[in-house]
Amino acid sequence: MATFGPLDVEDVYVHPHSQIQQRFYRSVGLPPFLFVDVCIQTHGREVVFGPADAFLGLFDRDGVLKCGAAPTMQIEAEAEALISRRWHWILVEKEVRRGHPLEALASYHAEVLEPLTELLRLRYAPHKIGYGLKHIYADLPAEVTRELESLYALTHPDDLRGGMEQAGRWMDELASTLT
């Protein structure tokens, strides 16, 4: 029987969902990007993968793993909740006016770009809500990720206003298709 060999990485990831346990392993001498990701989920957890998700369920005797799309009502409610947070954008302006560029940038990312990214996920990959930027290049069209990159690339406080204007126009467009 073959063995995995001595490990140089054995990491336990404390997952935010209480019904998921995840561990990462890598054997000594392997390239840094070659590792095993083991994710174990309790039987009672509802698991629905999207049509584009690649997954391998080794032990699913009861057929709890399912493929499907997010229900339309859930998408609409999620979109409305994200759009309603738009008033938080004033926090970016507040920090710019105070001369706090790091706090302005942090607010721009948290209050403008994160909700925009989630709206884009609702539009293009509704089965991957809450993934943030993880797998973004696989989940969104290339022209969308390029535009999103341009908004994330802004770092100077004077540029954040323009980024918010662009993000606002984009959110309005997404709102008309999602709600």
Image (cartoon, rainbow, N blue to C red):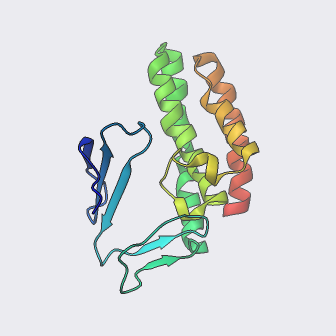
Q: In the rendering, at what x and y percent does residue 66 appear?
A: 49, 78
In the rendered view of the protein, which quadrant contains the C terminus?
bottom right
In the rendered view, tell whether residue 27 sits above or below residue 61.
above
In the rendered view of the protein, which quadrant contains the N terminus?
bottom left
In the rendered view, tell whether residue 83 sits above or below residue 33.
below
Q: In the rendering, at what x and y percent does residue 20 appear?
A: 30, 63
Residue furthest top as drawn:
99
**123 or 88, nearer to the observer:** 123
In the image, what residue occupies the spot 53% across and 43% down?
114
In the image, what residue occupies the spot 37% across and 52% down?
36
Please identify the quarter of the rendering in which residue 165 is found.
top right
Q: In the rendering, at what x and y percent does residue 35 appear?
A: 38, 47
Please identify the quarter of the rendering in which residue 175 is found.
bottom right
Residue furthest front as drawn:
1
Please identify the quarter of the rendering in which residue 125 is found.
bottom right
Q: In the rendering, at what x and y percent does residue 95 appear?
A: 48, 22
In the rendered view, tell whether residue 94 sits above or below residue 70.
above
Q: Is residue 96 left or right of residue 29?
A: right
**How many marks are shown on the rendered structure?**
0
